[in-house]
Amino acid sequence: MTPGGGSRHALVFGASGLIGRYLVLALAEAGADVTAAVRSAASGAKLEQWLSEHGLAGRISTAIVDFDAPELLPGGPAAFPFVTEIHNCAGSFRFGMPADEARSANVGIVEGLIDFAAGLPRLQRVVHVSGYRVGGQDPATVPWSDEHRAEVYRELGGYEASKVESDAIFQARALQRGVPWTIVNPATVIGDSVTGEADQHLGIAVTIEQLWNGTAAALPAGASTFVPVLTVDYLAAFMVAAAADPDAEGRSYWVLDDATPPLTDLLTHVGRHLGAKIPSLKIPVGVIKRLPRRFTGADPETLGFLSSDRYPTESAVELAARHSIPMPDVRVSLDRWVDYLAAHRFGAATGDGRRFVDAGGVRTFELGTSGSRQVIFPGLPVNADTWADVAAGIGARAVDLPGLGLSGGTGVQDWEQWLPAVLGDEPADLVGHSIGAAAAVVAADRFPARVDSLTLIAPFFLQAPAGASARLRPLVGAYLRHSDPARLSRTLTGSEASAPALASSRSDLKRGTATRVAEQLALAGSQRWRVELREALARFRGPVRIITGSEDPLAPDAIELLESASNVELISVSGAGHHPQLTHGDALIRLLMRVAAA
């Protein structure tokens, strides 16, 4: 906790949250020394790792905070005489909280924080994050009577009421203790304006997820409903500036993007960007607020945000202009945010290296090492997620084919424009599984200068044709759409062991890819296409490795044909079936590493 030599030292509460992380980064980049108040050493280590991954070269200090203890931080204010500003991003952001829990989390924090701040000799400002729907409370009303408190909490719900009360108490207590303060009332905070990154999935993000999953039955009607948004990096930059601006002392700022489209237009825009089906039914907001929760799918507290109110943003706009903080384009920011949400399956998939790219006009999902010249094309009916461990193990990128997994497009008909865009200009080593093997062979045949080698895993066109039932598209599509992960695992591998790895594939099938999977499975039964693929493979002169499971062998005539080719190596994985990435991932990684070394 030893401070650096800078004259500005910020203490950030809630530093490990979405806003807090970006604020710590912005403060450090602005030259401030930073102490991050975190709830555990593990949380502090995670924060430092995030900061390092986001380009922070220097280090920050951390301190363990306990909001229930007599002293918030070890040693109390006397241990932090160097702090010049406090930023309070702490609190609980969760709709549906009981009143006692919400009040303890949000009101109790500001009371303890102001008492702590009053003992800091060099303190110049406390910046408190409130909210655009709850800010602007009158400190003269503090203390609230029990009757008034009960009425507010009954009307607004635990979370919003606790934020209203904490806004009033923060001001009253700061005035009483002589603590200089500034309040920021941000709109709904979305992802970084450049990367879209965000790990908060509340409020409007829930509605967008419902659009993505196809479970949103209707949109709110009317052009006046306004749910403003704000990128997290803009908010962080604003707070850094406000803490040092003399004119900001004792003022509250509504920080939001006035250019945010009305809610219906916003949802329609992001739905189209995601390629989701937009509900044609529109229901007036007043009716939505009266519907039971089982119909809206929304926590009742969130419905209060469906309002046509506008907010006094002039002073925030002026402060941002004084400090040259430009507001990013809201539609571009929304697109990047929802891309990040969808690529990470709205929090179900964690980790870096997940992204959407444009490939030949097709919105394409890929994971793994960006720009890697080892490219994996997954098979049917699974997605790139089932290849994530293999891709990480060999430093590759796995790419969902058009119309499959998370990628847009419709199917094989997109390959002509899609394949060269995915390959890029430098030669690639292609790993194709099942129908992905067909994509790899087509790429090598049409763009031979861009393909160094082929590794074909369970290539269907070199195996015995599937039964006639695979060509019954409506039946296959219905089966896939209604299969749970355990059933899908039994179908693909013979056991339920791979059910967790198939949860995302099941989600994609249910969301809408089942029909396209069924179409491509039927196409895989075309004898003409199978012959064309075999002929294309024979024309490729680079190294070819064909990997099959011992329980899923090549057709005898294919073995005879391939054994006579000098550039082909046949490899069998003992005990594996058609999906070795699910059942024999480690063995597959070792084989592919050997291929890469060769």
Image (cartoon, helix red, strand yellow):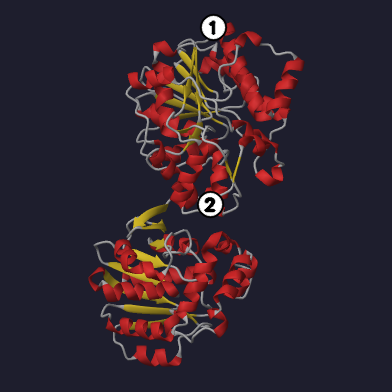
Asked if 95 appears above or below 459 in the picture, the reply is above
Asked if 187 appears above or below 555 in the picture, the reply is above
Q: Nearer the viewer, mark 1 or mark 2?
A: 2
Q: Secondary structure at mark 1?
A: loop
Q: Is residue 315 left or right of residue 428?
A: right
Amino acid marked by disc 1? Gly
Query: Can the viewer see residue 203?
Result: yes
Q: Quadrant of residue 175?
A: top right
309 and 132: which is toward the camera? 309
364 and 288: which is toward the camera? 288
Residue found 34% across the figure and 25% down from its top: 31
201 and 72: which is toward the camera? 201
Asked if 122 appears above or below 564 in the picture, the reply is above
* Mark 1: few/some/many CA within 10 Å (<14, 14-19, 20+): few
Quadrant occupied by the C terminus: bottom left
The numbered disc on residue 178 is 1
Residue located beneath label 2 in the image = 212
Q: Position of residue 191 (x, y in %)?
A: 45, 39
Q: Position of residue 557 (x, y in %)?
A: 41, 92
Q: Quadrant of residue 505?
A: bottom right
Residue found 46% across the figure and 34% down from its top: 21
The numbered disc on residue 443 is none
